Image: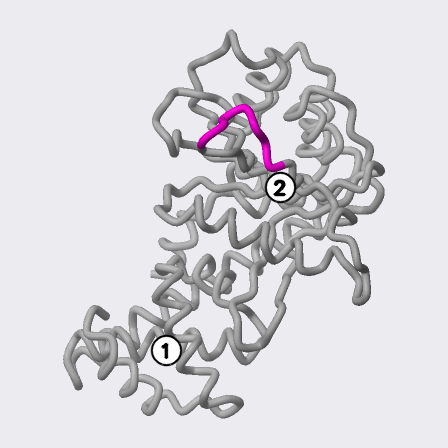
Amino acid sequence: MKKEKKQNIVPLKDLNLTDRFLFDEVLEDRETYQDVLSIIFGRDISLLDQPQTEKELRVSPLLRSIRMDVFVMSEEQSIYNTEMQDTRKADLAKRSRYYQSLIDTGLLEPGVPNYNFLNQSFVIIIMTFDLFGYGKYVYTFENRCKEVPGCSLGDGAVKIFINTKGKNADEVSEELIEFLKYVEHSTNETANQAKSERVRRVHDRVCKVKVNEEVGVKYMQAWEEKYYEREEGREEGRIEGRITGRAEGRIKTLVNQVCRKLAKGMEATAIADMLEEDEDVIRDICGVARQYEPDYDIESITEELLLSKSEY
């Protein structure tokens, strides 16, 4: 059974940049992230620091934290957070709002009297689907006056949703289109067809990541952890289903998995991604489970959730 399941893993060499693991590993390189941002904005962007991947931001232990794919500051002091999203989710717009708000909380030191010192910040979400349905490659959102559309708030907060399935080729650069094709098909053939030197440099980085032994081990470890968590969850779910009924067995299994991740210091967003569960469900479980730290009484957590959340 294990052998059959393991054959389903996509080898590292066959991953596209739409895979979050590969995306993070590739953009962790400063020069590569510079190239990607320069392609998106159509101008040269120089980065001040080394990009951070899986960066966690939290303002309070009682409030939800976020884990960003790739985060960096440019030499112009602008903040860039770039996310890869290959699964359509209904909360992406409000997620971008929450991400930007938490980014802002860390930009001003105590005692700074003038909010104009806030850095310009960009939340960029690269999607393999058209979230808004207008056929655009790029959707850029800034705060503007409803009564006077030409009047911009000028708060420096920008959200950019990039759609690999865009159709308005006459409105964006050829280089961006080549890059988005490469994101979906990160192969030698696609790279060789690109005219953009930046796209070819991104491909060079991708190739180096795919043949790196340490990255390969990291990829297998991440996949195996997710695989065995799922298998264990399925088995526990079958056992619990026979004993206490399918609904209770499912939530108890999920509670057990979530508590294990919480004990390792993981946050709800990362747990939801790893277990491939609905993020709101995981967040609710975490909210109850944290009341039982550090021992995590699985029975009590499950009972409380079953009493309050019949939709599980």
> At which x and y percent is residue 47?
81, 38
- Which part of the image, by quadrant, shows the C terminus? bottom left
- Identified at 54% across, 24% down, the residue is 150
Q: Say which mark, if any, is on residue 222.
A: none
What residue did someone put label 1 on?
255
Residue 16 can be seen in this image: no
Position of 233 compared to 188: left or right?
left
Q: Nearer the viewer, residue 96 or 282?
A: 96
Task: Tell me which segment is drawn in magenta.
Answer: 147-153
Quadrant of the rendered image containing residue 43 = top right
Which residue sits at x=37%, y=72%?
284
- Callout 1 secondary element: helix
Q: Amino acid at mark 1?
A: Val
Alpha carbon of mark 1 to alpha carbon of mark 2: how far? 37 Å
Residue 113, image x, y percentages: 79, 59
Residue located beneath label 2 in the image: 157
Q: Earlier in the sequence, mark 1 or mark 2?
A: 2
Can you say whether 200 is above or below 304 in the image? above
